[in-house]
Image (tube, rainbow, N blue to C red):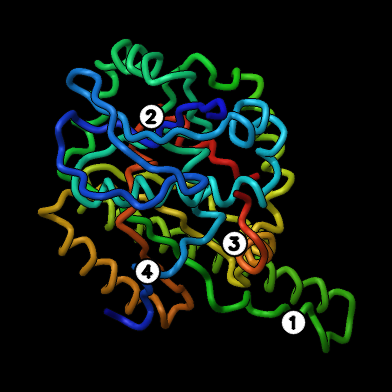
Amino acid sequence: MSNAMESWSNEQVALVDLIDRVIGGGVVIAGDVVIGVAGVDLVYLGLQLVLAPAHEVEQSVAAGRRPA
Amino acid sequence: MDETIVHAYGVVTANEPLGRFPPGIADTRVWVFDAERLAAIVSLLPVEGFGAREWEQNAENLRWLAPVARRHHEVLQHASANVAVVPLRLPSLYGSVESLADTLRSASDRLEHELYRIQGKREWAVKVYRTAKEESSTGGAGSTTGRDYLLARSRDLSSRSKAREQLQNQVREIHDALGDVSAEHLRSRPQDAALSGRKEQMLLNGAYLVSHADEVRFLGLAAEIADSSLPSGLLVEVSGPWPAYNFTGEAEATTTAVIR
């Protein structure tokens, strides 16, 4: 594989890529206790505010304890 | 036993061979729950810690969200290595497996369509960064008169805007060329440098749904593009295969990703 091209296999996926996909992609099928639309919007809004230092948070998460 | 809630990771066709799953969110056991023709990949989470209330309170807290997102992804990654999987968007909570089964049944047409859409294909991501800094402005330095200064300044601005346009075209060509080898392709908004933690500016954040038959060709082309773009200051990065996050669900969902 070329030097200019990097492809991951085992290394950790960047948090920003992950969040982008698991919250921005995929399918929504309404369930009985899924947070209401308003709640999800809130989640989006909040993430926009906190994602800025995502890579730093990730480092601190990796270094410290994982929530159980 | 403490009260639990069902977390669904993704949807597959029933009776697919999925092997042994990695641990789920909060180290829970992951299994496959059949609901007629479809099946959901699920695990049981303690309500206290992962219920709707926690989502509302903690979804903005990356210390809580990051491990949840990571495990959700790892389970999907495992499953999608072997079969077509429709990833479910977070939060993906159900009160019981029965209610999840009802939900799957009522959405079965849509889900089967999604499975059909990604069958035999995998998602790849290609990002293009700009390694070279924008040529630093001479800003008319050394001009002796105001008029010289303004002329030099305007030449400088127009050459920079031309260079920018050229870069945009180059990136569009890269995306189109990769798209030609893909079943579907789309551009997400480039990630902000503050989010990616990278110094280079992201010019392309592309996703490509590539059939197995075309994968070698796609990756070969990406490598070729990476080599030929480097001298012009573009760094091309390929990652994948990913679960088909960008090619399932509503079209608008893929373009309204979190990034500001």
Which residue, given by chain and number where applicable, does mark 1 sit on? B138
Dot label at residue B196 = 3
| Image side of residue B151 versus residue A28, left or right | right
Task: Give me the disc on residue B249.
Answer: 2
**Residue type indicated by callout 1:** Thr
Place of residue B125 in the rendered image (x, y in percent of width and height, measured from the top left): 37, 56
Query: Mark 3 touching mark 1, by CB under 8 A?
Result: no
Q: Label 1: few (<14), some or many (≥20) within 10 Å?
A: few
User: Between marks 2 and 1, how big is the CA–CA gap?
Assistant: 49 Å
Contact, mark 4 vs mark 2 (Cβ under 8 Å): no
Query: Percent from the top left, x then y, of residue B29?
Result: 39, 43
Comparing labels 1 and 4, the label whose residue is closer to the camera = 4
Residue A44: which numbered mark, if any? none
Q: Nearer the viewer, mark 3 or mark 4?
A: 4
Residue at screen point 63% across, 74% down: B134
Q: Are marks 3 and 4 in contact (CB under 8 Å)?
A: no
Circle 2/circle 1 CB separation < 8 Å = no
Could you say which quadrant of the image residue B128 lies in?
Answer: bottom left
Q: Which chain hosts label 1?
A: B
For this view, does B23 lie left or right of residue B161? left
State which tag comes first along the sequence, 2 or 1.
1
Image point 36% across, 75% down: which residue?
A: A5
**Residue type of the residue flagged with mark 2:** Gly
The structure residue drawn at horizontal position 37% and vertical position 50%, both measured from the top left corner, is B207
- List the residue tagged with mark 4: A10
Task: Give the structural element (helix, strand or loop) at label 4.
Answer: loop
Do pointers 1 and 4 mark residues of a single chain?
A: no
- Quadrant (top left, top right, bottom left, bottom right) of the C terminus of chain B: top right
Q: Nearer the viewer, residue B66 or B195?
A: B66
